[in-house]
Amino acid sequence: MGFVSEFKSFIMRGNVVDLAVGVIIGGAFGKIVESLVADLITPVLLKPALEKAGAASIETWAPGGVLLGKFIAAIISFIVIAFVLFLIIKGMNAAMKKKEEAPAAPPAPTKEEVLLTEIRDLLKQGR
């Protein structure tokens, strides 16, 4: 197998494509969470504390020259992302559990099974 064809088969495997889609969606989701933290959570919840600390935003809060606010914003983003992923996985697990719990109807016996059952019953009767 040539190098190019081997590389092509590696790329086209399902798990590699799924991983690529996950990374792209994760990057977009990260931007949404960053906006949530910077544009909604920080102004609504942290604005009074930031005003007392003399910072315009959490990212610019730097007591003693250390960008502590930027670190706190990253922690908030991580917690929000982890919580949303938890909810998504919990929902998927619940859906899979319901799917597994649904009793499947037993398959109808084949013609051969019906004939074998009749033969067995006749042999039991002594015929």
Image (cartoon, rainbow, N blue to C red):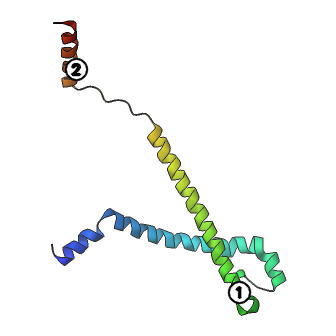
Residues marked 1 and 2 touching at CB (< 8 Å)? no
Q: Quadrant of the C terminus?
A: top left
Hey, which quadrant is residue 87 in on the image? bottom right
- 63 to 35, vertically: above or below: below
Q: Residues within 10 Å of mark 1 (few under 14, many from 20)?
A: some
Q: What amino acid does circle 2 point to?
A: Val
**Which residue is drawn at the image coordinates 72% and 93% (left, top)?**
65
Say which mark, if any, is on residue 60.
Answer: 1
User: x%, y% of residue 57?
Assistant: 73, 82
Using the numbered discs, state the Cα–Cα distance from disc 1 to disc 2 in whole angstroms.
Answer: 79 Å
**Identity, as a three-letter code, of the amino acid under mark 1:** Thr
Q: Who's the residue at 22% across and 20% down the image?
A: 114
Q: Which residue is nearer to you in this view: 5 or 28?
A: 5
Per the image, the residue denoted by label 2 is: 114
> Which image quadrant for residue 7?
bottom left
Point out the tag, 1 or 2, that comes first from the N-terminus: 1
Furthest residue toward right: 52
Where in the figure is residue 102, as x and y percent of width and height? Answer: 45, 36
Q: Which residue is situated farthest in the top direction here?
A: 126
Q: In the drawing, does residue 35 fall left or right of residue 122?
A: right
When the figure is inspected, residue 90 is found, relative to residue 17, above or below; the finding is above
Q: Nearer the viewer, mark 1 or mark 2?
A: 2
